[in-house]
Image (tube, helix red, strand yellow):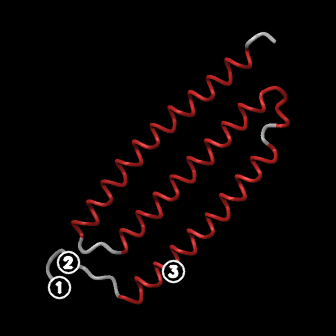
Amino acid sequence: MSGNQFEIPKEMRSMAEASLEQARKAFDTFISSAQQTAAAFGGASLGGSGGAAKEISAKAIAFAEKNVQTSLAYAQQLIHAKDLTEVMRLHTEYVQGQMRALAEQASEMGQVVTRAAMDAAKPK
C-alpha cells in the first residue's frame, strides 16, 4: 500500500453497497408515497390556490428526490474510490454540484411562490 492508497475490505464494501441499496429502496418507497399523498390532497384545503400549492408541493418533492439520489450516487462513488485523492476530488465535485443545485432550486421555488402570490392577489 503506497502513501495515499487505501483499500476498503471487500466484505465492508459489500455491506456498504447493500446498505446503500436498502436506503435507495426505502427512499423510493417514501418518495412514491409522498407523491401519491401530494396528488391526493393537492392543495384542496387551500381554496382557490390549490393549483399553486400542488405545483409547490410537486417541486419540493422533485427537489428532495433529486438531492437524495445525488447523495446516494456520491456515497456509491466513495465506496469505490481508489485513493484519498479520488475521495477529495469526488467530495469537491459533490459539494460544488450540490451548491449549484440548491441555488437553482431556491431560484425556481422562489419563482413558483412569487407566481402563486401574484395569482392569489389578482382580483377575482
Residue at 78% x, 32% y is 50
Residue at 66% x, 37% y is 56
In this view, the residue in front, 42 or 96, is 42
Residue designated by label 2: 5
Mark carried by residue 18: 3
Do labels 1 and 3 touch, CB within 8 Å? no
Query: How far across and down, in percent of the image, does residue 38 sit?
Result: 74, 47
Q: Looking at the image, is 75 positioned above or below residue 1?
A: above
Residue at 30% x, 54% y is 92
Q: Looking at the image, is 116 positioned above or below residue 74?
A: above
Q: Earlier in the sequence, mark 3 or mark 2?
A: 2
Query: How far across and down, in percent of the image, does residue 123 sit?
Result: 78, 10
Amino acid type, mark 2: Gln
Q: Is residue 20 left or right of residue 76?
A: right
Between disc 1 and disc 3, the foreground one is: 3
Q: Looking at the image, is 119 positioned above or below residue 11?
A: above
Image quadrant where one finds the N terminus: bottom left
In this view, the residue in front, 75 or 49, is 49
Do labels 1 and 2 touch, CB within 8 Å? yes
SS at circle 1: loop
Amino acid type, mark 3: Ala
Which quadrant would residue 86 be assigned to in this image?
Answer: bottom left
SS at circle 3: helix
